[in-house]
Image (spheres, rainbow, N blue to C red):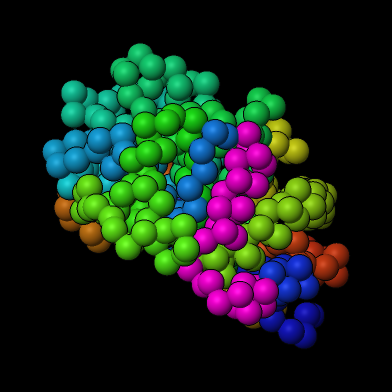
């Protein structure tokens, strides 16, 4: 058995990130400045988007995006229950209502037909989430959006570098939001990026991400800057620091290499866990296009002889860190009580919830770590059959 606990997630940081942060600290310019601007430029090039705005979380990116498309009190935004609370909380922050559309049972991505059924005259936007890093069916979602004249904002917290029919996520719809949280595919500790090709959305988000101050407010402590500014709207405080951007610049350059490593781990899991009765592997449409932020298996308690919670306990007892993505939003007290929701209202999300387990998948894992995870799962399955 494995001697040391294997964390569920950990970043892979090198001397490049450390050197750039040290340089930033020595420069004396800590907050949004040239490094952030460089990170935005390089992110635009990486994705192939016209505008990228660095912010201090994906939550901030989502909030700005919804505000920019005009979501406000009384509006509805259609999203998935199979996500983290941030996706829906920002809708609430704007006085609007998150309307959930069930996910597909296989990919756990939101079902485009379910989105269409949830559209009402109050719907103001569609907010799909690329679950685990696998792209949603964006052609179908785009068709629904066009038919109803709605903008699409993508929650791509898991989805860098994810492709959909050959195109990178970030080039597919009106606005796309990325996360650089500590466990994400590219990290800045805390951080995010919002990208768009639309000039008007880019302008609005730029204004709102830094207090609603008139243009290039971040320059006001430089020689080229001016003390004078105007407040054009009651904006937010969502700018990214240069310290964080210093990390992000180098993480982004390693993004494809990290992805290759996670794809390799996913392939090892697929080979090592195939054919275990009661363990279903992730349903994947295009292995190379999947961003592999998460590797989510599904436990069939009756077949395996162990339910999901006991399975997790046994993995942790074998020193393997795991997680669950996600406890669907409609069963959390806030959403359940506010919108009088029952678990069975979203049968696919609810059925999946009782079965899902996320196994560790990150570039820092060694082949030995991966082998330990596979052996632990095999071991638990063998014991349960006895
Ligand atoms: C699907 C999804 N959306 C949004 C977020 C929020 O990201 P951040 O922590 O960068 O605000 C997360 C974070 O875990 C997430 O998993």
218 in relation to 256, above or below:
below
The spot of residue 185 in percent (x, y) is: 64, 56
277 in relation to 366, above or below:
above
* Residue for point 19% across, 40% down: 72
* Residue for point 67% across, 41% down: 46
User: Which residue extends farthest front?
Assistant: 223
Q: Would residue 74 appear left or right of 7 to someone viewing this image?
A: left
Instruction: Between residue 136 and residue 232, name the one nearer to us.
Output: 232
For the question of whether residue 148 can be seen, the reply is: yes
The spot of residue 128 in percent (x, y) is: 44, 37
Instruction: Between residue 129 and residue 300, name the one nearer to us.
Output: 129
State the image quarter where residue 68 is shown: top left
* Residue for point 42% across, 66% down: 221
Q: Would residue 342 appear left or right of 283 to someone viewing this image?
A: left
User: Which residue extends farthest left?
Assistant: 74
Give the dominant element type of the magenta stretch: helix, strand or loop.
helix
What count of labels does the image hold? 0
Instruction: Between residue 47 and residue 326, name the one nearer to us.
Output: 47
289 is within the stretch colored magenta:
no
Q: Would residue 68 appear left or right of 134 to someone viewing this image?
A: left
The spot of residue 252 in percent (x, y) is: 68, 53
* Residue for point 47% across, 64% down: 222
The spot of residue 343 in percent (x, y) is: 31, 49
353 in relation to 307, above or below:
above
Q: Would residue 341 appear left or right of 243 to someone viewing this image?
A: left
Q: Quadrant of the N terminus?
A: bottom right
Bounds of the magenta span? 21-48
User: Which residue extends farthest top?
Assistant: 147
User: Which residue extends farthest right?
Assistant: 367
For the question of whether residue 355 can be seen, the reply is: no
């Amino acid at each position: 058995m494995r001697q040391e606990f294997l964390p569920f997630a950990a970043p892979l940081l090198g001397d490049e990130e450390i050197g750039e942060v040290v340089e930033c600290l020595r420069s004396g310019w800590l907050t949004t400045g040239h490094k952030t601007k460089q990170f935005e430029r390089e992110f635009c090039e990486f994705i192939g988007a016209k505008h990228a705005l660095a912010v201090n979380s994906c939550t901030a990116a989502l909030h700005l995006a919804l505000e920019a498309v005009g979501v406000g009190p009384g509006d509805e935004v259609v999203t998935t229950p199979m996500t983290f609370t941030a996706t829906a909380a920002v809708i609430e922050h704007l006085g609007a209502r998150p309307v959930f559309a069930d996910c597909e049972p296989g990919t756990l991505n939101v079902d485009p037909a379910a989105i269409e059924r949830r559209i009402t005259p109050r719907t103001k936007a569609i907010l799909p989430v690329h679950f685990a890093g696998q792209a949603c069916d964006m052609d179908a979602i785009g068709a629904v959006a066009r038919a109803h004249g709605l903008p699409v904002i993508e929650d791509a917290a898991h989805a860098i570098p994810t492709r959909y029919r050959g195109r990178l996520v970030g080039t597919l719809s009106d606005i796309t939001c990325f996360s650089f949280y500590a466990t994400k595919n590219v990290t800045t500790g805390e951080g995010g990026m919002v990208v768009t090709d639309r000039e008007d959305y880019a302008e609005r988000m730029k204004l709102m991400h830094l207090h609603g101050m008139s243009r290039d407010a971040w320059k006001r402590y430089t020689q080229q800057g001016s003390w004078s500014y105007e407040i054009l709207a009651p904006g937010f405080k969502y700018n990214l620091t240069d310290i964080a951007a210093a990390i992000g610049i180098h993480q982004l350059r390693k993004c494809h290499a990290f992805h290759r490593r996670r794809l390799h781990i996913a392939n090892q899991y697929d080979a090592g866990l195939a054919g275990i009765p009661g363990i279903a592997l992730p349903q994947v449409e295009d292995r190379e296009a999947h961003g592999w932020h998460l590797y989510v298996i599904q436990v069939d308690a009756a077949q395996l002889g162990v339910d999901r919670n006991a399975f997790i306990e046994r993995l942790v007892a074998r020193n393997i860190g795991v997680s669950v993505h996600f406890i669907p939003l409609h069963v959390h007290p806030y959403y359940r009580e506010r919108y009088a929701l029952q678990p069975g209202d979203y049968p696919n999300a609810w059925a999946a919830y009782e079965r899902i387990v996320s196994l560790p998948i990150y570039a820092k894992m060694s082949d030995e770590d991966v082998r330990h995870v596979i052996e632990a799962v095999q071991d638990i399955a063998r014991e349960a059959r006895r």
